[in-house]
Protein backbone atom coordinates (compact mmCIF):
# COMPACT_ATOMS: atom_id res chain seq x y z
CA UNK A 1 0.00 0.00 0.00
CA UNK A 2 2.87 2.36 0.81
CA UNK A 3 4.40 1.86 -2.66
CA UNK A 4 1.01 2.58 -4.25
CA UNK A 5 0.73 5.79 -2.25
CA UNK A 6 4.23 6.92 -3.31
CA UNK A 7 3.43 6.10 -6.95
CA UNK A 8 0.21 8.16 -6.92
CA UNK A 9 1.94 11.17 -5.34
CA UNK A 10 4.74 10.86 -7.89
CA UNK A 11 2.27 10.78 -10.80
CA UNK A 12 0.46 13.80 -9.33
CA UNK A 13 3.75 15.72 -9.11
CA UNK A 14 4.52 14.86 -12.75
CA UNK A 15 1.07 16.22 -13.68
CA UNK A 16 1.74 19.42 -11.72
CA UNK A 17 5.10 19.79 -13.44
CA UNK A 18 3.44 19.50 -16.87
CA UNK A 19 0.75 21.98 -15.80
CA UNK A 20 3.51 24.40 -14.77
CA UNK A 21 4.84 24.23 -18.31
CA UNK A 22 1.37 24.82 -19.76
CA UNK A 23 0.93 27.80 -17.41
CA UNK A 24 4.24 29.22 -18.67
CA UNK A 25 2.94 29.09 -22.25
CA UNK A 26 -0.30 30.86 -21.25
CA UNK A 27 1.60 33.50 -19.26
CA UNK A 28 3.91 34.12 -22.23
CA UNK A 29 0.79 34.71 -24.36
CA UNK A 30 -0.25 37.48 -21.97
CA UNK A 31 -3.03 35.75 -20.04
CA UNK A 32 -3.69 37.01 -16.52
CA UNK A 33 -2.19 34.64 -13.89
CA UNK A 34 -5.31 34.76 -11.70
CA UNK A 35 -7.44 33.83 -14.72
CA UNK A 36 -5.16 30.85 -15.40
CA UNK A 37 -5.41 29.75 -11.76
CA UNK A 38 -9.21 30.16 -11.82
CA UNK A 39 -9.69 27.96 -14.89
CA UNK A 40 -7.25 25.41 -13.54
CA UNK A 41 -9.51 25.09 -10.49
CA UNK A 42 -12.84 25.42 -12.33
CA UNK A 43 -12.10 22.78 -14.97
CA UNK A 44 -10.66 20.53 -12.26
CA UNK A 45 -13.90 20.99 -10.32
CA UNK A 46 -15.94 20.07 -13.42
CA UNK A 47 -13.88 16.91 -13.94
CA UNK A 48 -14.38 15.79 -10.33
CA UNK A 49 -18.11 16.54 -10.63
CA UNK A 50 -18.15 14.38 -13.76
CA UNK A 51 -16.59 11.54 -11.73
CA UNK A 52 -19.32 11.98 -9.09
CA UNK A 53 -21.98 11.52 -11.78
CA UNK A 54 -20.70 7.98 -12.45
CA UNK A 55 -20.18 7.13 -8.78
CA UNK A 56 -22.80 9.08 -6.80
CA UNK A 57 -23.16 6.78 -3.78
CA UNK A 58 -21.03 5.84 -0.79
CA UNK A 59 -19.60 9.31 -0.15
CA UNK A 60 -19.48 11.07 3.22
CA UNK A 61 -20.37 14.77 3.01
CA UNK A 62 -21.38 16.01 6.45
CA UNK A 63 -18.68 14.47 8.63
CA UNK A 64 -16.81 17.09 10.69
CA UNK A 65 -13.36 15.93 9.55
CA UNK A 66 -14.45 16.00 5.92
CA UNK A 67 -15.86 19.53 6.16
CA UNK A 68 -13.04 21.01 8.26
CA UNK A 69 -10.26 19.27 6.32
CA UNK A 70 -11.75 20.20 2.94
CA UNK A 71 -12.18 23.83 3.99
CA UNK A 72 -8.56 24.04 5.18
CA UNK A 73 -7.34 22.31 1.99
CA UNK A 74 -9.38 24.73 -0.17
CA UNK A 75 -7.83 27.73 1.57
CA UNK A 76 -4.40 26.15 1.16
CA UNK A 77 -4.80 25.50 -2.57
CA UNK A 78 -6.20 29.02 -3.16
CA UNK A 79 -3.37 30.54 -1.13
CA UNK A 80 -0.76 28.48 -2.96
CA UNK A 81 -2.02 29.50 -6.41
CA UNK A 82 -2.54 33.15 -5.49
CA UNK A 83 0.63 33.83 -3.46
CA UNK A 84 2.78 32.03 -6.01
CA UNK A 85 1.58 34.28 -8.82
CA UNK A 86 1.99 37.40 -6.65
CA UNK A 87 5.55 36.31 -5.92
CA UNK A 88 6.26 35.82 -9.64
CA UNK A 89 4.87 39.29 -10.40
CA UNK A 90 6.92 40.97 -7.64
CA UNK A 91 10.19 39.02 -8.14
CA UNK A 92 10.65 36.40 -10.86
CA UNK A 93 9.77 32.76 -11.52
CA UNK A 94 13.08 31.41 -10.18
CA UNK A 95 12.84 33.16 -6.80
CA UNK A 96 9.10 32.42 -6.47
CA UNK A 97 9.63 28.72 -7.23
CA UNK A 98 12.54 28.43 -4.79
CA UNK A 99 10.52 29.99 -1.97
CA UNK A 100 7.41 27.90 -2.67
CA UNK A 101 9.40 24.67 -2.79
CA UNK A 102 10.57 25.29 0.75
CA UNK A 103 7.23 23.60 1.56
CA UNK A 104 8.84 20.37 2.90
CA UNK A 105 10.50 22.43 5.63
CA UNK A 106 7.13 23.86 6.73
CA UNK A 107 5.58 20.38 6.55
CA UNK A 108 8.42 19.01 8.68
CA UNK A 109 8.02 21.75 11.32
CA UNK A 110 4.26 21.16 11.53
CA UNK A 111 4.80 17.38 11.63
CA UNK A 112 7.19 17.76 14.58
CA UNK A 113 4.73 20.08 16.35
CA UNK A 114 1.85 17.57 16.10
CA UNK A 115 4.06 14.59 16.92
CA UNK A 116 4.09 12.58 13.67
CA UNK A 117 7.79 13.20 12.90
CA UNK A 118 10.94 13.21 15.04
CA UNK A 119 13.39 16.07 14.65
CA UNK A 120 16.78 14.66 13.64
CA UNK A 121 19.93 16.29 12.26
CA UNK A 122 19.84 13.86 9.32
CA UNK A 123 16.36 14.98 8.22
CA UNK A 124 17.21 18.68 8.61
CA UNK A 125 20.39 18.20 6.57
CA UNK A 126 18.47 16.30 3.88
CA UNK A 127 15.88 19.10 3.65
CA UNK A 128 18.67 21.67 3.29
CA UNK A 129 20.14 19.58 0.46
CA UNK A 130 16.75 19.55 -1.31
CA UNK A 131 16.47 23.34 -1.01
CA UNK A 132 20.04 23.65 -2.34
CA UNK A 133 18.99 21.44 -5.26
CA UNK A 134 15.97 23.68 -5.95
CA UNK A 135 18.22 26.79 -5.88
CA UNK A 136 20.59 25.18 -8.41
CA UNK A 137 17.70 23.95 -10.59
CA UNK A 138 15.88 27.31 -10.69
CA UNK A 139 19.16 29.27 -10.82
CA UNK A 140 17.77 31.73 -8.29
CA UNK A 141 21.35 32.30 -7.08
CA UNK A 142 21.75 34.61 -10.10
CA UNK A 143 20.26 37.42 -8.09
CA UNK A 144 19.08 40.70 -9.54
CA UNK A 145 18.83 43.42 -6.90
CA UNK A 146 15.93 45.02 -8.78
CA UNK A 147 13.93 41.84 -8.32
CA UNK A 148 14.07 41.93 -4.53
CA UNK A 149 10.74 42.83 -3.00
CA UNK A 150 9.48 42.31 0.54
CA UNK A 151 6.01 41.63 -0.89
CA UNK A 152 7.38 39.13 -3.41
CA UNK A 153 9.55 37.30 -0.88
CA UNK A 154 6.72 37.19 1.67
CA UNK A 155 4.26 35.93 -0.97
CA UNK A 156 6.70 33.19 -2.05
CA UNK A 157 7.05 31.95 1.51
CA UNK A 158 3.27 32.21 1.97
CA UNK A 159 2.85 30.00 -1.13
CA UNK A 160 5.06 27.39 0.54
CA UNK A 161 3.11 27.60 3.81
CA UNK A 162 -0.15 27.30 1.84
CA UNK A 163 1.26 24.20 0.13
CA UNK A 164 1.86 22.67 3.57
CA UNK A 165 -1.62 23.68 4.74
CA UNK A 166 -3.43 21.94 1.89
CA UNK A 167 -1.40 18.76 2.46
CA UNK A 168 -2.50 18.58 6.11
CA UNK A 169 -6.06 19.61 5.19
CA UNK A 170 -6.37 16.74 2.70
CA UNK A 171 -4.68 14.32 5.10
CA UNK A 172 -7.10 15.22 7.91
CA UNK A 173 -10.18 14.98 5.67
CA UNK A 174 -9.05 11.64 4.21
CA UNK A 175 -9.46 9.99 7.62
CA UNK A 176 -13.24 10.10 7.21
CA UNK A 177 -14.03 10.78 3.57
CA UNK A 178 -13.31 9.85 -0.05
CA UNK A 179 -11.62 11.94 -2.71
CA UNK A 180 -14.69 13.15 -4.61
CA UNK A 181 -16.57 15.15 -1.94
CA UNK A 182 -13.39 16.45 -0.32
CA UNK A 183 -11.95 17.71 -3.60
CA UNK A 184 -15.29 19.21 -4.67
CA UNK A 185 -15.55 21.19 -1.43
CA UNK A 186 -11.89 22.27 -1.58
CA UNK A 187 -12.09 23.30 -5.26
CA UNK A 188 -15.40 25.07 -4.63
CA UNK A 189 -13.66 27.25 -2.02
CA UNK A 190 -10.76 27.83 -4.42
CA UNK A 191 -13.11 28.96 -7.21
CA UNK A 192 -15.07 31.20 -4.81
CA UNK A 193 -11.91 33.00 -3.70
CA UNK A 194 -10.40 33.44 -7.18
CA UNK A 195 -13.74 34.57 -8.65
CA UNK A 196 -13.22 37.98 -7.03
CA UNK A 197 -9.71 38.31 -8.51
CA UNK A 198 -10.54 37.92 -12.20
CA UNK A 199 -12.27 40.19 -14.69
CA UNK A 200 -15.62 38.91 -16.00
CA UNK A 201 -14.79 39.98 -19.57
CA UNK A 202 -11.54 37.98 -19.48
CA UNK A 203 -13.46 34.95 -18.23
CA UNK A 204 -15.62 34.98 -21.34
CA UNK A 205 -12.75 35.68 -23.75
CA UNK A 206 -11.12 32.33 -22.94
CA UNK A 207 -13.91 30.39 -24.69
CA UNK A 208 -13.25 32.01 -28.07
CA UNK A 209 -9.46 32.08 -27.76
CA UNK A 210 -7.01 29.91 -29.69
CA UNK A 211 -5.51 28.89 -26.34
CA UNK A 212 -8.75 27.27 -25.09
CA UNK A 213 -7.30 23.77 -25.49
CA UNK A 214 -4.39 24.73 -23.20
CA UNK A 215 -6.78 25.96 -20.49
CA UNK A 216 -8.72 22.69 -20.73
CA UNK A 217 -5.52 20.63 -20.65
CA UNK A 218 -4.29 22.62 -17.65
CA UNK A 219 -7.53 22.05 -15.75
CA UNK A 220 -7.75 18.34 -16.57
CA UNK A 221 -4.11 17.51 -15.80
CA UNK A 222 -3.14 20.12 -13.20
CA UNK A 223 -6.50 20.63 -11.53
CA UNK A 224 -8.42 17.37 -11.79
CA UNK A 225 -6.34 14.24 -12.36
CA UNK A 226 -3.29 15.40 -10.39
CA UNK A 227 -5.27 16.27 -7.28
CA UNK A 228 -7.26 13.01 -7.45
CA UNK A 229 -3.98 11.08 -7.65
CA UNK A 230 -2.35 13.18 -4.93
CA UNK A 231 -5.26 12.74 -2.54
CA UNK A 232 -5.33 8.98 -3.17
CA UNK A 233 -1.60 8.75 -2.57
CA UNK A 234 -1.67 10.95 0.52
CA UNK A 235 -4.04 8.52 2.26
CA UNK A 236 -1.17 6.00 2.43
CA UNK A 237 1.77 8.41 2.68
CA UNK A 238 3.06 10.62 5.50
CA UNK A 239 2.73 14.39 4.82
CA UNK A 240 6.51 14.92 4.88
CA UNK A 241 7.11 12.07 2.42
CA UNK A 242 4.37 13.38 0.12
CA UNK A 243 5.84 16.90 0.12
CA UNK A 244 9.31 15.53 -0.64
CA UNK A 245 8.12 13.24 -3.45
CA UNK A 246 6.31 16.24 -4.95
CA UNK A 247 9.71 17.92 -5.46
CA UNK A 248 9.76 16.07 -8.79
CA UNK A 249 7.38 18.84 -9.95
CA UNK A 250 10.03 21.55 -10.65
CA UNK A 251 12.19 18.92 -12.36
CA UNK A 252 9.34 18.00 -14.74
CA UNK A 253 8.60 21.71 -15.33
CA UNK A 254 12.27 22.27 -16.22
CA UNK A 255 12.32 19.29 -18.61
CA UNK A 256 9.09 20.62 -20.17
CA UNK A 257 10.83 23.96 -20.83
CA UNK A 258 13.80 22.18 -22.39
CA UNK A 259 11.58 20.13 -24.72
CA UNK A 260 8.97 22.79 -25.61
CA UNK A 261 10.92 26.07 -25.37
CA UNK A 262 14.26 24.53 -26.45
CA UNK A 263 15.96 25.93 -23.35
CA UNK A 264 19.40 24.59 -22.48
CA UNK A 265 19.85 22.44 -19.38
CA UNK A 266 23.08 23.50 -17.69
CA UNK A 267 25.47 21.37 -15.63
CA UNK A 268 24.41 23.36 -12.57
CA UNK A 269 20.74 22.51 -13.17
CA UNK A 270 21.59 18.84 -13.72
CA UNK A 271 23.46 18.89 -10.41
CA UNK A 272 20.35 20.35 -8.75
CA UNK A 273 18.14 17.64 -10.28
CA UNK A 274 20.50 14.92 -9.06
CA UNK A 275 20.65 16.43 -5.58
CA UNK A 276 16.84 16.54 -5.30
CA UNK A 277 16.31 13.01 -6.64
CA UNK A 278 19.02 11.35 -4.52
CA UNK A 279 18.03 13.15 -1.31
CA UNK A 280 14.30 12.55 -1.81
CA UNK A 281 14.96 8.86 -2.52
CA UNK A 282 17.11 8.54 0.61
CA UNK A 283 14.49 10.21 2.83
CA UNK A 284 11.69 8.00 1.53
CA UNK A 285 13.68 4.78 1.82
CA UNK A 286 14.84 5.76 5.32
CA UNK A 287 11.28 6.66 6.35
CA UNK A 288 9.99 3.37 4.95
CA UNK A 289 12.50 1.32 6.93
CA UNK A 290 11.55 3.17 10.13
CA UNK A 291 7.86 2.31 9.63
CA UNK A 292 8.53 -1.46 9.45
Image (tube, grey):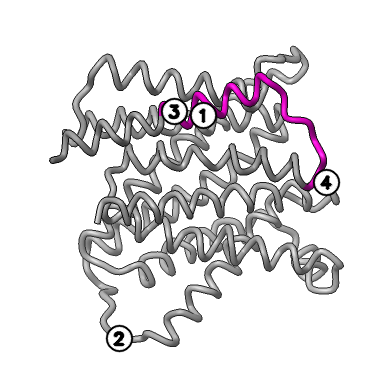
CA separation in Å, label 3 and label 1: 25 Å
Q: Earlier in the sequence, mark 2 or mark 3?
A: 2
Q: Nearer the viewer, mark 2 or mark 1?
A: 2
Q: Position of residue 184 (x, y in %)?
A: 43, 69
Find residue 157 and name its label. 1
The vertical placement of 291 against 120, above or below, is below
**Which of 201/124 is in front?**
124
Q: Which residue has dot 3 on it?
A: 278
What span is colored magenta in the figure? 260-279
Q: Is residue 283 visible?
A: yes
Q: Which residue has dot 4 on it?
A: 28
Q: Residue at x 44, y 35 (%)?
A: 161
Q: Earlier in the sequence, mark 4 or mark 1?
A: 4
Q: Nearer the viewer, mark 4 or mark 1?
A: 4
Relative to 156, is 213 on the left or the right?
right
Find residue 57 and name its label. 2
Q: Earlier in the sequence, mark 4 or mark 3?
A: 4
Q: Earlier in the sequence, mark 2 or mark 1?
A: 2
Q: Is residue 154 visible?
A: no
Q: Is residue 266 magenta?
A: yes
Indicate the secondary structure of the residue bearing disc 1: helix
Q: Residue at x 59, y 47 (%)?
A: 17
Q: Residue at x 27, y 14 (%)?
A: 121
Q: Residue at x 52, y 44 (%)?
A: 80
Relative to 82, is 54 on the left or the right?
left
- For the image, the number of numbered tags is 4
CA separation in Å, label 4 and label 2: 43 Å
Indicate the secondary structure of the residue bearing disc 4: helix
CA separation in Å, label 4 and label 1: 24 Å
Q: Position of residue 263 (x, y in %)?
A: 80, 35
Amino acid sequence: MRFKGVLFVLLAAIGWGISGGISSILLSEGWDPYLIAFYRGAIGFALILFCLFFNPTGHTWLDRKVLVGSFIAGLGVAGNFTFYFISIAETNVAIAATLMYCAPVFVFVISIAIGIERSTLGKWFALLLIIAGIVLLTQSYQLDASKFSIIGLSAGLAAGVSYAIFIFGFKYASQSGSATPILLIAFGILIGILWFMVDAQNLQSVWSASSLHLFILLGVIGGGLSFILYFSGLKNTKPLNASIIAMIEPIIATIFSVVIFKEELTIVQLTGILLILLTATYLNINSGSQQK
